[in-house]
Amino acid sequence: MKPGLFTVLGVAAGAVGTAVLAPVALTMAGFTSAGIAAGSLGASMMSSAAIANGGGVAAGSLVALLQSAGAAGLSAGATAAVASVGGAVGAAFGGAADFFSRPPPNNDDTTERLISKYMAIMLTLIIGLLMVAIIIVKEN
């Protein structure tokens, strides 16, 4: 298998998978087009949010955003953000698969350089995920 192929596959699978499965996950959590399903995780979250806010769910809260996405679907920006996060996570897993599927190097110096590069990639992905999270919060 060509070097980096697992990374490419991970990005593609992560991005497409999260974009397609996000609405399914919202519905399974109880955030449906008809409202929050009784006895669901969404109902529990709504109850906790209402208690914390003195009886009502605050506009712009996590519960309100999830219910909006469950009722109307994800906006183009939210879909792009979800796909970006999924792609980044897929890249991390694919990169790890690429890294560990390589034959062992002949000396310790090469191993240390590979580990340093991998750690730099992981740090970049973490920073990217934090930036996406900030964008999502500011968009809503």
Image (spheres, rainbow, N blue to C red):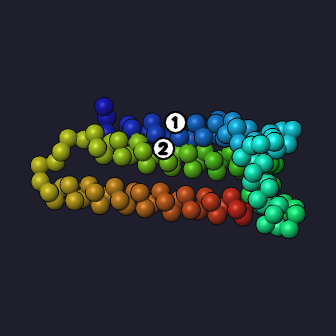
Residue type at mark 2: give it.
Gly
Contact (Cβ within 8 Å) of mark 2 with mark 1: yes
Q: Who's the residue at 30% across and 46% down the image?
A: 99
Query: Eyeballing the image, is 97 above or below 45?
Result: above
- Residue 37 visible, this orientation: yes
Q: Position of residue 72 (x, y in %)?
A: 83, 42
- Return the x and y of residue 55 as percentages of the image width and height: 88, 63
* Residue found at the very far top of the displayed protein: 1
Q: Quadrant of residue 130?
A: bottom right
Q: Which quadrant, please, contains the C terminus? A: bottom right
Q: Residue at x 22, y 59 (%)?
A: 112
Near-viewer residue (40 or 105) = 40
Is residue 2 toward the left or the right of residue 34 in the image? Answer: left
Give me the residue at 25% from left, 41% from top. 102
Q: Where does label 1 land, which residue?
A: 13
Q: Is residue 103 above or below residue 128?
A: above
Residue 90 numbered mark, or none: 2
Residue 71 visible, this angle: no
> Between disc 2 and disc 1, whose residue precedes?
1
The CA span between labels 2 and 1 is: 7 Å
Q: Residue furthest left?
A: 106
Number of numbered discs visible in the structure rendering = 2
Figure quadrant of the N terminus:
top left
Residue at 87% of width from left, 38% of height from top? 34
